[in-house]
Image: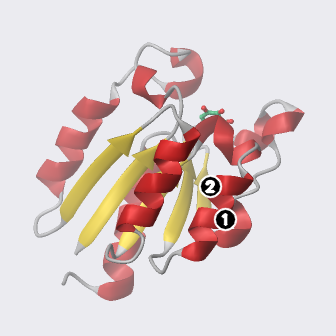
Amino acid sequence: MKIIIINGPNLNLLGKREPEIYGSQDFETYMNQLRLQLDGIELDYFQSNVEGELVDKIQEVGFSYDGIILNAAAYTHTSVAISDSIAAINSPVIEVHISNIYSREKFRHKSIISANCVGMISGLGLEGYLLAITYFINKDGIK
Ligand code: DQA
């Protein structure tokens, strides 16, 4: 089973960035913990601050991976290009947000990618990524 986590802009700063909102753990450490917990699953990770690079990665993995976990970060609220790329591929995408976007500023309440995703997890911290992986595992069984 092949799963990829794709993180958008500013998520490379996790651990340093607004820790009161996003927590104090950096993502590389979290990824190492995840990989230790997940036997038999190929778990890849990609992060970019550049919209087109996120579209390129979604296209690249979107016809062969069993699941994509996407935190498009600020592009969640703005990117028609990312939303279209999710609609264009075959792999199921789960949208994840570390914070609860509905309890924050109004401009974060609207996600233009949700409609093209299987589902969305928001506000459960980094745990949201593991919950999304668990969904993919339980859905298909380990291949
Ligand atoms: C975020 C929420 C977005 O509104 C914000 O722009 C981010 C992170 C989250 O994980 O909570 O960068 O996607």
Query: Quarter-wise, where is residue 21 in the image?
Result: top right
Assess whether mark 2 and mark 1 are in contact (beta carbons under 8 angstroms).
Answer: yes
Q: Quadrant of ligand 1?
A: top right
Q: Amino acid at mark 2?
A: Ile
Coordinates of residue 118 in the picture (x, y in percent): 58, 74
Badge 1: residue crowd in 10 Å (few <14, some 14–19, many ≥20): some
**Which residue is depicted at the point 33% across and 32% down?**
27
- The residue labelled by disc 2 is 82
Mark 1 belongs to which amino acid?
Asp
Label 1 residue SS: helix
Please tell me which residue is depicted at 58% across the width and 74% down the height of the picture: 88
Q: Is residue 119 visible?
A: no
Q: Is residue 39 above or below residue 53?
A: below
* Quadrant the C terminus occupies: bottom left
Residue 121 vertical placement versus 77 (above, below): below
| Residue depicted at 34% across the width and 76% down the height | 66
Q: Which residue is mark 1?
A: 84
Badge 2, how many Cα within 10 Å: few under 14, some, many 20+? many
Q: Is residue 36 left or right of residue 113?
A: left
Total marks shown come to 2
Distance in Å between CA atoms under marks 1 and 2: 5 Å
